Amino acid sequence: MIQNDTIIALATPSGAGAIAVIRLSGIDAVKLVSENFQSVTDGKKLSSQKTHTIHLGHIVDGKKTMDEVLVSIFKNPHSYTGEDVIEISCHGSPYIQQEIIQLFLRKGCRMANAGEFTLRAFLNGKLDLSQAEAVADLIASDNEASHQIAMQQMRGGFSSEIAKLREELLNFASLIELELDFAEEDVEFADRTQFSDLIDRIIFVLKRLIDSFAVGNVIKNGIPVAIVGEPNVGKSTLLNALLNEERAIVSEIAGTTRDTIEDEISIGGIGFRFIDTAGIRETQDVVETIGIKKTFEKIEQSQVVIYLFDVSNSIEKLDQVSVEIWKIKNKYPQKPLLIIANKIDKLDDNQLASLQETIPEVKLLSAKTGFGVEQLTNSLLNLINTGALRNNETIVTNTRHYDALLKAFEEIQKVKHGLDSGLSGDLMAIDVREALYYFGLITGEVTNDDLLGNIFANFCIGK
């Protein structure tokens, strides 16, 4: 897959802006730009300039001046891709951007494919595969937590941990393979006690990484939270209060929300996706019935459920509310449930005491005034185990990595069983090689064109 041709792409978002950055990488990157660049300072050719320098001048096409630009030079191997890289900072007119790109396409460049700059960085040994994938996660991060995890992985925190275990396992695998060459002498090069200790340590690390995916996945993709309850209890008002904007239509008419409304906000650095659902009740309205059906679908898809009820209309029938709460708990026993009493501003002290006595776990809220919203957001944060994040531990967020870890764990368990049962070295070597294969899939020691194609196809062009 290694190609030496020179590629070009817009590295900033398309459209008008103050500036745009056009990136070139490849064997002719410096030469091509040098031929179409006129310095306004020293008049020197770009090709004679040092790496990691910036130069002011004009991009020209013959006698035609296209734009005044800043050109940054990064010469191999000290560049992002490991090749010669040029970045042209031009004015952000879409016309100027396209004129410059078309100029270099005519001069022999090729338009970069999605993620091709990062692919070249991987192929040239500047990044391993898990670091390269973290680049895409970093670009896509939209909250503090996902950004922190992506930065940690891009710096090699995850891959260095895997690489260290793989190296130790590889050393023992070599000794076991060596034993097979001397099978007739019945010698033992790999100390079985040390090997067993290593396997136990690998199992411990793999279990921790596999368990971290539960947290990492929700941090990366956001935590879906379904807001459910009867019609007209304030679900849409709560959504608006959480988002601090008029996202959902609020009306005194029951059944206003007939479809689900979703929006995402960051709370304490964690992304939460709130889903305002249609009110649950018996109805003959065909459209509202469809909305209620979608409500139950969204509850199935959510990871947290907020059950909201209007306490001003329910204070005399709290037993009935308790039954509804029991139904949700019984139907979705694995989902955390937050029980919220809305419109508490309409209660007196005696009614408030009765409410808290009947439903001890209830949280008090006035979505209209904003009272209790902060307590609710704190409760949501407490449901997420962010200890690993706070301690800057390695957290797995990538489904491909998770799958490879599971398979490596399965093979290591087989090795452990083989050690405990005194299995012969030739049979153990098979399981060790399989475990090494899955470790290699994560960091990129083992790759194929299909795997790389699938990974980098999800990148943006220009990165």
Image (cartoon, grey):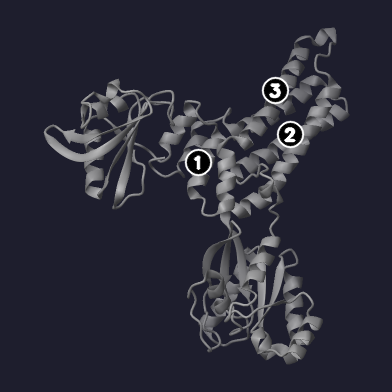
Identify which amino acid the numbered label 2 is placed on: Glu
Q: Position of residue 423 (x, y in %)?
A: 84, 25
> Nearer the N terminus, badge 3 or badge 2?
3
Cβ–Cβ under 8 Å for marks 1 and 2: no
Farthest left residue in view? 63
Residue 414 at least partly seen: no
Cβ–Cβ under 8 Å for marks 1 and 3: no
Identify the residue at image location x=18%, y=34%: 60
Quick one: quadrant of the N terminus?
A: top left
- Of badges 1 and 3, nearer the viewer stands 1
Q: Which residue is mark 2?
A: 411
The reply, left or right, for residue 101 in relation to residue 395 is: left
Q: Which residue is mark 3?
A: 170
As drawn, the label of residue 370 is none
Farthest right residue in view? 421
- Of badges 1 and 2, nearer the viewer stands 1
Q: Residues within 10 Å of mark 2 (few under 14, many from 20)?
A: many
- Is 294 in front, or is 248? 248
Q: Is residue 401 above or below residue 163?
A: below
Identify the residue at image location x=65%, y=29%: 163
Whole-angstrom CA distance, mark 3 to mark 2, is 14 Å
Quick one: quadrant of the C terminus?
A: top left
Quadrant of the rendered structure where residue 2 is?
top left
The reply, left or right, for residue 325 in relation to residue 302 is: right
Whole-angstrom CA distance, mark 1 to mark 3, is 28 Å
Quadrant of the rendered structure where residue 61 is?
top left
Q: Which residue is mark 1?
A: 135
Q: Position of residue 338 (x, y in %)?
A: 70, 71
> Nearer the N terminus, badge 1 or badge 3?
1
